[in-house]
Amino acid sequence: MDKKISQKKNRRKNQKINIRTIIVLLFILYMLLLFAVLVLKYPTGMLEGSFKKIISGESITRMEPKWIPFETITDYVSRAHVLQDWFVKNLACNVIMFLPFGFLLPWFSKLKGWRLILSGCLLSVAIEVLQYATALGQMDVDDVILNTLGTALGYGIYLLIVHYKNK
């Protein structure tokens, strides 16, 4: 009887390890995709264009950073007339792209609560600085705000699942 209970516990432990491994692999894949899309601008070809300019000796044009909070968000919302507008998609994508960060990370990390949300904010700041440094995007404080919101919403989804799982 004790042997069966022990085997059952080992099976559950192995299932938890396998699920955790899958979540870690998903998180790594997510981070690689995030880097490819936000920093390398895949699949737009912006990176290739910048490299060609550098090799040919041309200067790379950097867009001026946007430092005023909610300026871009307000502008995009005022221009959006339907959900299919580019402006709405841009705002939504900035939130959606960071949902997995807030959702996946707490499953295998000790980061929880405001520390997790702060880490999403800091990741967003790092991406914005890289975009500016490489001239592959426009550094915008509103992107940081929306990305941080996405992290918080992802973490909220995590909390809901944990809450209902433990009931």
Image (spheres, grey):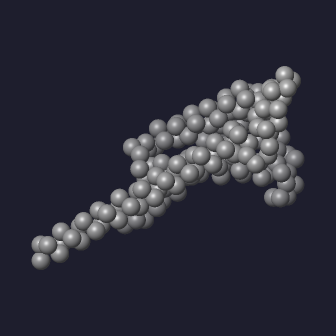
Q: Residue at x 58, y 50 (%)?
A: 30
Residue 165 spot, x, y in % from top left: 40, 65
Vertical relation: 108 (above or below) 120: below
Quarter of the image containing the N terminus?
A: bottom left
The furthest residue to the left? 2
Q: Nearer the viewer, residue 50 or 81?
A: 50
Question: From where the camera sits, is residue 164 visible?
Answer: yes
Please tell me how many numbered marks the rendered image carries: 0
Q: Residue at x 35, y 65 (%)?
A: 15
Residue 130 spot, x, y in % from top left: 67, 31
Q: Is residue 22 left or right of residue 133?
A: left
The furthest residue to the bottom? 1
Residue 25 spot, x, y in % from top left: 49, 53
Q: Is residue 48 left or right of residue 15?
A: right
Q: Nearer the viewer, residue 80 or 65?
A: 65
Quarter of the image containing the C terminus?
A: bottom left
Vertical relation: 57 (above or below) 16: above
Vertical relation: 12 (above or below) 107: below
Question: From where the camera sits, is residue 155 visible?
Answer: no
Q: Residue at x 85, y 26 (%)?
A: 56
Give the image quarter of residue 7: bottom left
